[in-house]
Amino acid sequence: MGMAVGWTAFPADPSQQLRSPRAGTAVLSEGEELVYEVSWTVFTLGTVRLRSHPDLSAEAYIDSYEDLPFVDLHSIHTSQMDSQFYSRASSSLELKETGWWGLEYTYDFAHRRVLVEETRRQSPDAVVSQRTPVDTIALADTNFVDGLSIAFYPRRFVYTAGTVSVPTVLYGKLGVTTFHFPGEATTTSIDAVDDPVLVVEVEGSTSVVGIFGMTGAFTGWFSADEAAVPIKGTLRVLLGTVDIELVSWKRGAWRPPTEQ
């Protein structure tokens, strides 16, 4: 049984707040489809397609490009969140040689625990052919994020100066992710937009291991508007450091905000 971990947030300080984006259903009221390209040094590794819905459910489809000599990855992650972007249901699937290997999480909040089961199936939509209990994760608090909701949770705080740490369940393990929010707008550039994009930079670190072997320090840039859309990021993984950049989006009439 895993060790129970609690949560610590920074105290509210109105003097340090810029604008506060509306959390939860308002942030995702339009639904979204965001596509990112992942690169390492001079190589483009693949894409991350992130879909979210007004009911606060989300899916991520991660696919490496074909014929790469060192990466062959195809995975699907799902999450159901509450209005504060804490996880309320989640699962993950990854393509292996013998089919799709998965982890399914049953949240037993009455007993402050998460039950983890390993699954096997022939395709993402197929019936589970094998199910094996693998762990029980004890929780000190039922407010935590999973491997997918970790991308949504910072959108609550990008306009607030401070630091927040939140328990994180990732690939069947419990750890802590810490975000530092300077609360200041700046600019960055991406190939999909001609002008500099207005963003808020967020620094952080995680103690658990995620996709591509992600762990440790990371930096993200979120759009400096009410949507707080992730624009780009830098992550530490097994290969070293990878960059993730927004290449296309569908979110009503939204476009990345610019100085022009």
Image: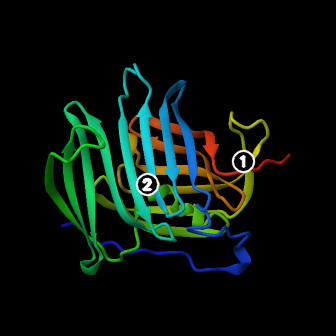
Q: Nearer the viewer, residue 230 or 129?
A: 129
Task: Kindly identify which residue carries mark 2.
Answer: 148
How many other residues sit within 10 Å of disc 2, few (<14), some (14-19) or many (≥20)?
Answer: many
Looking at the image, is 208 positioned above or below residue 246?
below
Judging depth in this view, the residue of 168 and 50 nearest the camera is 50
Which label's residue is closer to the chain start, 2 or 1? 2
Q: How many labels were placed on the picture?
A: 2
Q: Mark 1 sits on what residue?
A: 255
Label 2's element?
Answer: loop
Relative vertical location of residue 144 with respect to residue 256 in this rendering, above or below = below
* Residue in the image at 86% along x and 46% along y: 260
Tell me residue 171's x, y (percent): 30, 52
Please provide percent x and percent y for residue 20: 68, 70
Q: Amino acid at mark 1?
A: Arg
* Color scheme of the displayed model: rainbow
Query: Does the rendering let one see residue 235?
Result: yes
